[in-house]
Image: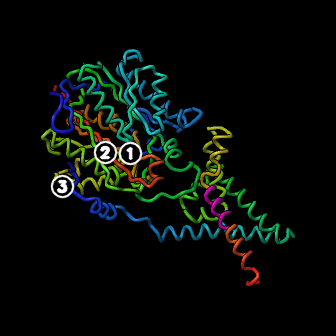
Amino acid sequence: MNRVGEQTFLYEHPPAIVSHASIVGPKEGRGPLASWFDTVLEDDILGQKSWELAEMEMVRRCAKNAMNQAQLSDEDVQAMLGGDLNNQIIASSFAARTLGIPFIGLYGACSTFVQALVMGAALISGGFLENALCVASSHFCTAERQFRFPLELGTQKPPQASRTATACGASLLAAQGNDNALRVTSGTVGRVIDLNITDANHMGAAMAPAVFDTVAAHLSDTGRRAEDYDLIATGDLGWIGRDLLLALADAAGIDLPPEKLIDCGASLYYQEQDTHAGGSGCGCVASVSCSWLMKRMEAGELNRLLLVGSGAMLSPTSSQQGQSVPGIAYAACIERSKV
Amino acid sequence: MSRQPLTPDEYHELVSKLTPPSRMLRGYWRAFWVGGLICCIGQALTLWAQQLNLGEVTAPMFTTSCLIFLGTTLTGIGVYDRIGKYAGAGSAIPVTGFANSVAAPAIEFQREGAVMGVGARLFTLAGPVLAYGIGASVIVGVVYWLVRGWVL
């Protein structure tokens, strides 16, 4: 059986994470996780003509780095699954154009990386692919101009606002892998949850109920408790969203120990870096899981990780028309195989 | 089936409890002194213009032009967004802020070309101010025209 409970895939042939790569921008490169990233960019533009092309180049470099580590060429990779925050996911699709890998474009807002892991693992476990490159990116400058204001406009942000991270992460999944490789063992597809938050700045509040829903579904589907995981890492809830998730779990009577819960977006920056509630964007969960978390797992510090990508499914049109901000979350369980 | 332990109303209450408030007093103070400083610069320019015998009509225009030049230049060299982040309304309300709201999209949308980029986006932020500002002044003008017989 490849499925348990209501929303969870339990992979019969769990794919191995054979390589992973991460790239972050200069500001993220001054944060607490700086030394864990494979590449810290010196500037945001990467010698390109536009921010969008810069993000595309970031995706291409990150994908290449993951493929090089696994000693695979563009022709060897059977599918690239990924997305970003740009309209019509142009950063990922333009990178796929350059790489020439069969492309499955995904959009789960900031949860896209985990969505890609869940889908990629399913396709490999089901025998449709031998390997898959899962990738997601975000860029501060492309997100600002699309969702908010021009960069040079002098505006203030409220404490609940977040900063879109300039970051990209890529993981290469494969059916084969060595005995103690990291493996994606199960994945939970979330539902779109909306508790009627209309403040488009407060994405942590919009997404926390969706993250809670997916985590609760994952635990109930797999019959596990939060203690069965060494760490639960959420995508980009930020500091306030993390507190909201803990409060929701408490209200529902689910034991979620705070010391086991980290948020990738909140971990990207020091508080003094003035990013308000923390980092947001697809790149948060992608870059932090493909560096810090997976490296710690490979070092044997963590054996079982629940990675929960969180996404706010809003667009400038929906917010301008006064619609609330629905959230979504995908969860992937990553385990270090027993030697 | 909903797994949510809280109703939307209960959740909104929780959100407002856990969200730190904006630091209003600090914001007022920063807006006051930066906005005040910009106004003082404007007043100094006006006084200077009067010394140059620019006249009552030309002196304010001279002041406005200088402030717009200042706002645009500071936007172009990437300083005005930092002032705005610090001062909020203090730097958004004076005419320098208006200049910033036109110059910022002009810089941002250059890459989309001169017509659909800069041309179409130049007034995305200033446009509403112009539309309603001009609209309001037309209404005030009509009202003035109607009642001037009684008032004057």
Badge 2 and badge 3 in a common chain: yes
Q: Alpha-carbon distance for marks 2 and 3?
A: 19 Å
Which amino acid is tagged 3?
Answer: Ala
Per the image, the residue denoted by label 2 is A192
Q: Which of the numbered marks, if any, corresponds to residue A313?
A: 1
Quadrant into which the N terminus of chain A falls:
top left
Nearest to N terminus: mark 1 or mark 3: 3
Quadrant of the rendered image containing residue B92: bottom right
Disc 1 from disc 3: Cα separation:
24 Å
The main secondary structure of the magenta stretch is helix
- Tell me where residue A176 appears, x and y as whole percent: 25, 19
Which of pointers 2 and 3 indicates the residue nearer the eye? 2
Say which chain tag 3 marks. Answer: A
Magenta range is B127-136
The residue that label 3 is drawn on is A252
Residue B66: percent from the left, percent from the top?
75, 60
Task: Say above or below: A186 vs A277.
Answer: above
Residue nearer the viewer, A258 or A30: A258
> Mark 1 vs mark 2: which is more N-terminal?
2
Report if the CB atoms under discs 1 and 2 are less than 8 Å apart: yes
Q: Which residue is at a point 17% across and 45% down the rendered structure image? A: A226
SS at mark 2? loop
